[in-house]
Amino acid sequence: MSDFEIGGAAPQSVQQAAAAYEVVREMFGGAVSDFDANEFMPFFEVLEPEKWPDIALFMRDHPKLKFNYMACLSGVDYPDDEKLGIVCNLESLGIFGHRIAVKVKCSREGGVIPTVAYVWHTANWHEREAYDMFGMQFSGHPDLRRILCPEDWEGFPLRKDYKVQESYHGIKVPY
Amino acid sequence: MGLLDAGISKHNVVITSVDNVLNWARLSSLWPMGFGLACCAIEMMATNASNYDLERFGIFPRSSPRQSDLMIVAGTVTMKMAERVIRLYEQMPEPRYVLSMGSCSNCGGPYWEHGYHVLKGVDRVIPVDVYVPGCPPRPESLIGGLMKIQELIRMEQIGISRAEALKKLAEKSSDPQQVIERDRQVVRA
């Protein structure tokens, strides 16, 4: 009767995510990476970013997947790999209840990731935030402007090598 | 010494200076601008509300900078907000006073090093008369700061500058430790 077994089978949530991943893998094959079945945030990576909107639409509408809810979209900086990326946390809210995360990466300078703002409207502002903080472009985004920083702010604050600008409109910025 | 402390007895006639009357009028109806920027604003609102009741000092938040003579900068001033704060300050009629409430507005607070978006002290953009430390300051501290503004107004005279009034205020200040000790002895006795 115990729900938790040490060294036993993966938790139910991971098994559900794995099953959902298999459906995506079957359809898109080499465009997606292998499944990372960790307990905290099971995920796969999209290896061909140009296919990301198709995968997203597929995941939202396929009768076995129905990922109807984007819980979060976060930007990530990978300075060692010279890459930027996003992590999308998807959930099938009220239908299957399964969750999975999807990672998409692009190059650090001039990197482009296709938008999924037309798939989940949540992605609209989240992609703007990722652009604001990390500087990757989202091609096809309806309104890609900075969302938090002033529009004429210099640099992208959450990059690991970010240095704050000396002054903004004549006001000293550093302490 | 306030004007009403003079004791009006002889047929409601009191003789005093113009300075005194003007200062008394100003300090008895300080109207702060009703705006808050972060968690300090919650504390400021609590001070305005019935438990601490700022209206007993004639302090009542106004909705327009044009009707206000005191700006309580309550909270984190971001770079984006800094320009709006300048604009609001410029819209206030003189004489105007600025009270900087809380660590963020005093010096950047917890954002002083890594908060790229935070102005490190509102005194970088507008002149501040009184700083209230705290994160956030309790209502008692804010009231203390407001009393300091009132003292500052009392120091003013026609023909002397704000800087001179602030200097006079600083000269008048005393070490609080002595007051605390004195009160303790009174309690013990």
Image (tube, coloured by chain):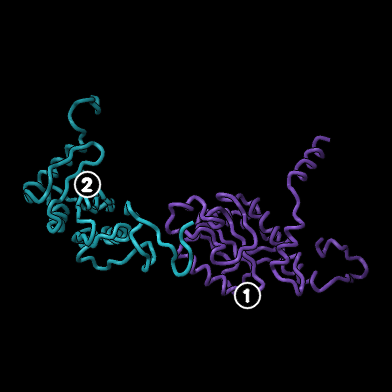
Q: Which color was chain A given?
A: cyan
**Residue hosting label 2:** A101
Quarter of the image where one finds residue A96: top left
Which chain does tag 2 point to? Answer: A
Q: Is residue A17 above or below residue B64?
A: above
Which of the two residues, A94 or B107, is positioned nearer the viewer here? B107
Q: At numbered mark 1, what does the secondary structure look like: helix, strand or loop?
A: loop
**Where in the figure is residue A62, as x and y percent of width and height?**
12, 52
Q: Residue at x 57, y 65 (%)?
A: B34
Mark yes or no: residue B24 visible: yes
Discs 1 and 2 share one subunit = no
Q: Position of residue A28 (x, y in %)?
A: 8, 51
Q: Which chain is purple?
A: B
Residue tagged by mark 1? Answer: B93
Left or right of B11? Residue B64 is left
At which x and y percent is residue A95? Answer: 20, 47
Amino acid beneath label 2:
Ala
Characterize the local packing of mark 1: few (<14), some (14-19) or many (20 or more) Cα atoms within 10 angstroms: few
Q: Identity of the amino acid at label 1?
A: Pro
Instruction: Judge by depth and name the residue closer to the eye, B121 or B26.
Output: B121
State yes or no: discs 1 and 2 in contact (Cβ < 8 Å).
no
Q: Residues within 10 Å of mark 2 (few under 14, many from 20)?
A: many
Does B66 appear above or below A120?
A: below
